[in-house]
Amino acid sequence: MHVDIIGVGNANMDIIVKVSRLPTVDEKILAEDVKFLPGGGASNFAVACSRLGASAGFIGCVGDDHFGRLILENFRREGVDVSRVKIVRRNTGFVIAISDVQGRYFMVASRGANLELKPENLDEKYISCAKLVHGSSLRSEIAETLGMKAKKFNVLSSIDIGAELAHLGRSKVLEILRNYDFVFLNRTSYRLIFNVNPVRENLLKYFPKGPKILIVTLGENGVLVCDGKRVIHVPAVKVKVVDTVGAGDAFAAAFLVYFLETEDLEDAARYAVAAAAFKIQKVGGQKGLPTREELENFVKKLSH
């Protein structure tokens, strides 16, 4: 099957546990609420694109277990193509997030089946038919291969840099980024890689070789978008924050879907900021991802 946008990376089950207070060592306390929700950066991204009306697919791995089946079912329900999802003999990746009423939390993650994603799973025929491939929180060998394959077939590519890549050191990261058109990173990753704060003059001064667009999210301060010649700042939208998980994925999906349609950086960034604001009002990586209609109505309300 041919799809326009492909998400590459992790598919997890997020186990969200609410407690009245965090337990101490050796203490058992009862959960007030438990939710099992599909998540993982690339998985959230593919679902977000599909909800915004793009034809989307996913390349990744799940285990031959209950969580894996739930994730595949969810993809199908959301209209995401799963023909390149590999089912492996390993537990499906999961994240356990335990949070108290004050919003303090701790998380435990198991990569599980996600570690089985190998460079050879990046199907060239599938990639060559797409308009864009997007990698999220990838290991370095996958990030490297995905960028090279996209370039080989003249397919647009984007990458959301997770902590793992950001810690590789500047020269290694910049080498990987050479093959990508769009680079998404948050302010922490930007500082780690470039050793400076993400402000206008630094984005221009240290603009990497290769990428066309660099997008740096600044949390409550909005986002900076740079094409090497100019920097656009779009402020954040003030909403009640319930859960920030998946906000970056909602942002990247909306930015790329709208940019592919309009090639207007400012417009794409405005919709992306709005999509992230819409998402953070709901719990779970995919729960608050807006449909096209929801996002456009939300943006209309904001402009009044």
Image: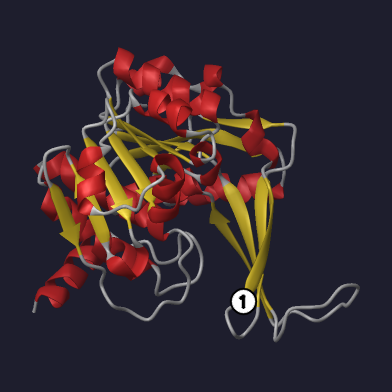
Q: In which quarter of the image is the C terminus?
A: bottom left
Q: Where is residue 23 in the image (x, y as percent from the top left)?
A: 79, 78
Q: Which residue is drawn at 15% across and 77% down?
A: 301
Q: Where is residue 213 in the image (x, y as percent from the top left)?
A: 22, 38
Q: Position of residue 114 (x, y in %)?
A: 62, 37
Whether residue 256 is visible? no
Q: Position of residue 208 (x, y in %)?
A: 29, 32
Relative depth, front residue between 194 and 168: 194
Q: Is residue 80 above or below residue 172?
A: below
Q: Is residue 217 above or below residue 194?
A: below
Relative depth, front residue between 230 and 254: 230
Q: Is residue 3 above or below residue 50?
A: above
Q: Residue at x 51, y 37 (%)?
A: 165
Say few, some or many: other residues with alpha carbon within 10 Å of mark 1 (under 14 / 14 to 19 / 20 or more).
few
Whether residue 166 is visible? yes
Q: Quadrant of residue 233?
A: bottom left
The image's colour scheme reads secondary structure
Q: Residue at x 40, y 45 (%)?
A: 46
Q: In which quarter of the image is the N terminus?
A: top left
Q: Quadrant of residue 259?
A: top left
Give the total number of marks visible in the rendering: 1
Name the outermost residue toward the right: 26
Q: Mark 1 points at which residue?
A: 104
Give SS at disc 1.
loop
In the drawing, does residue 48 fall left or right of residue 297? right
Relative depth, front residue between 126 and 188: 188
Q: Which amino acid does label 1 sit on?
A: Arg
In the drawing, does residue 180 fall left or right of residue 41? left
